[in-house]
Image (cartoon, rainbow, N blue to C red):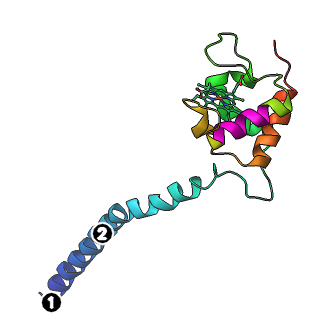
Amino acid sequence: MRLQHLTLALIGLVFAIGLLGASGPVFASPAAAKPVVASTTPAPLPPGPKAPPSGGAMAQTCAGCHGTEGRLKAAAFMPLAGMPRAQFVQAMRDFRSGKRPSTLMGHVAQGFSDGEIDAMAGYFANVKPE
Ligand code: HEC
């Protein structure tokens, strides 16, 4: 009789441990998934001040409206390719300050420092307009 009770108790114990083991990972899985999400999030962050983005890299953000490399055959938006440096810098600074009225470019230009505008000016001035 005692052995039977002991056996039943052991079976019960094993069963209970099995349940714990099964429920453990179920509750743990959302928490375990989080570090995976967190570790992929920092990857697309822009480089720090020691590695400023190049004019060409920043110019990619202009492509949606001004065309790839600033070349746009449909004239809805002004093409930027081949724009003289000084003209580009002046346009961007005037958009940023509000001196030059704009629908969109005032908002766009506010995202860039003088150094970044200069870097993009160098990039676009060197792209040959088609
Ligand atoms: C959301 C669309 C959009 C984006 C993105 C955009 N632009 Fe513009 N851009 C315009 C529009 C529209 C104009 C005409 C002025 C206005 O109404 O804002 C313009 C005008 C300009 C001009 C004046 C061109 C000329 O012939 O005088 C420059 C320079 C310029 N954009 C540079 C840029 C640069 C550099 C970027 C990327 C950092 C950029 N734009 C991104 C829409 C855009």
Furthest toward the front, the residue is 99
Q: Secondary structure at mark 2?
A: helix
Mark 1 or 2, nearer chain start:
1
* Crowdedness near tag 1: few (<14), some (14–19) or many (≥20) residues, C-alpha within 10 Å: few
Whole-percent x and y of residue 20? 29, 71
* Residue 18 disc label: 2
* Residue 20 in sight here: yes
* Residue 109 in sight here: no
Q: Does residue 31 sit above or below 91 in this rendering?
A: below
The residue range painted magenta reads 88-96
Along the line of sight, the residue nearer the viewer: 13 or 100: 100
Residue type pointed to by label 1:
Arg
Residue type pointed to by label 2:
Gly
Q: Quadrant of the N terminus?
A: bottom left
Along the line of sight, the residue nearer the viewer: 69 or 114: 114
The answer to which image quadrant residue 54 occupies is top right
Most common SS among magenta residues: helix
Whole-percent x and y of residue 106? 60, 37
Q: Secondary structure at mark 1?
A: helix
Whole-percent x and y of residue 82? 83, 22
**Side of 19 where 53 appears, left or right:** right
* Residue 2 disc label: 1
Figure quadrant, ligand 1: top right
**What residue is rendered at 58% in x and 30% in y?**
102
**Side of 127 where 97 appears, left or right:** left
Q: Does residue 122 sit above or below 20 in this rendering?
A: above
Along the line of sight, the residue nearer the viewer: 82 or 19: 82
Give the CA distance from mark 1 to mark 2.
24 Å
